[in-house]
Amino acid sequence: RCDAFGAAESSYDLKQHAQNLPPPPATNPGTFGPNFIADACEVAIPALVNICSVQKGPWGQIAQSAGSGFIIRSDGLIATNAHVVRNAKVLNITLNDGRQYRGRVLSADELSDLALVLVEDPLEAPLPVMAIGDSGNLRPGEFVIALGSPLNMQNSVTAGIVSSTARAASEIGIPQSRLDYIQTDAAINVGNSGGPLINLKGEVVGINTMKVAGGDGIGFAIPINAAWLVLQQLRDTGKVVRPFLGLRMASLNKNLVRHEKRQNNNFPDVETGLLVVGVAPDSPAMRAGIRPGDVIVEFEGKGIATVQELTRAIGYDVGKTYSITVARRGTGTEHLSITSEGLKL
């Protein structure tokens, strides 16, 4: 017979049957089990936060916006995007389990669009911390997962693949940025900004930052290796110092080399490299003896073909000396040393 809820009565001992079943297969984060996305999320989501920012407008009006972030230190230090907390008067932080805290902007860097937020309220216990991965090992086609609060829907999960591991900032309309971006088709929408892009181990490999307006499946995240260099400076000094060489350069290709040789018979005999277009007065480049018209063909003993390669190689190191090889017409190649200095803004 059926009871009031329609459940059939049976003498079958379900509990005994469950005891006789073999244990479920163990799943480790990073393995491709049947619930591999859920497994990765389970590792990372406890350290995911929603950030509600309250701003005051120029005429006293109050506005609110929402974004995401993730905890990187157990005392409540949170990484996010600078645009998530820009002009914030009040920050309300909500954890995955519903706990809420007040926060404040510790430091921010608009050029890289990164910021640190610190929980201000007393903590009853250390907060969960998200594991940091290695974005340098990412390959196009790898699974990634975007966590955050798109359109203020907290603790949302979207999944996709890495479409590109190094999309140049100039390609997506941010020429002032030194960063390359991870391109992904995991859905990134308003409110996802500042949240983590994780791998199948539940480790952060990027910080969700933007999507292409009007484009589906084209989102971008700051690689965690590059972001971490900025976040460390923001944590330690409250600002970001960038290296300065004093060079204006253009990446050479066969067509550009052919054009330059037609214009100048003294152009160096090269096929690729970085053409020095200008050298700033009293700069590290000028003191190193680099001249306009030189072609940089090696940096730290390795061939170099694009300005982006040089920018990546320098990173955020200030005061470091590098070896470079330049090609000059009539003198062959010359080996020089250049020491970066802090960019004065």
Image: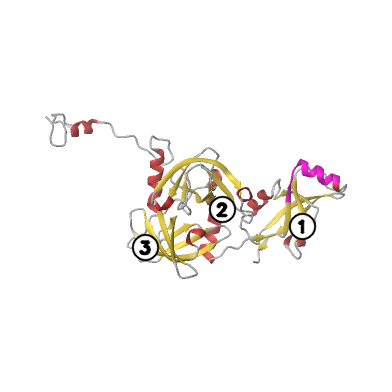
Q: Tell which tag, 1 or 2, sits nearer the viewer.
A: 1
* Lateral position of residue 171 relative to residue 335, left or right: left
The amino acid marked with disc number 2 is Ala
Which sits earlier in the primary sequence, circle 3 or circle 1? 3
Front: mark 2 or 3: 3
Mark 1 element type = strand
Q: How crowded is mark 3: few (under 14 residues within 10 Å), some or many (20 or more)?
A: some
**Residue span colored magenta:** 250-262
Q: What element carries label 3?
A: strand
Looking at this view, is 212 or 67 the one in front?
A: 212
Numbered circle sitting on residue 124:
none
Q: Name the residue under label 1.
A: 278
Q: In which quarter of the image is residue 258?
A: top right
Figure quadrant of residue 318: bottom right
Residue 91 image point, x, y percent: 42, 63
Q: Distance between the residues labelled 2 and 3?
A: 29 Å
Identify residue type, mark 3: Tyr
Relative image position of residue 158 (x, y in whole percent) = 44, 43
Which residue in the structure is indicated by mark 3?
101
For disc 2, the marked residue is 226
Would you say the residues marked 2 and 3 are in contact, meaning their CB atoms lie under 8 Å apart?
Answer: no
**Are there few (<14), some (14-19), or many (20+) residues within 10 Å of tag 2?**
many
Q: First in sequence: mark 1 or mark 2? A: 2
| Rendered location of residue 25, percent (x, y) | 34, 34
Q: Magenta span has 21?
A: no
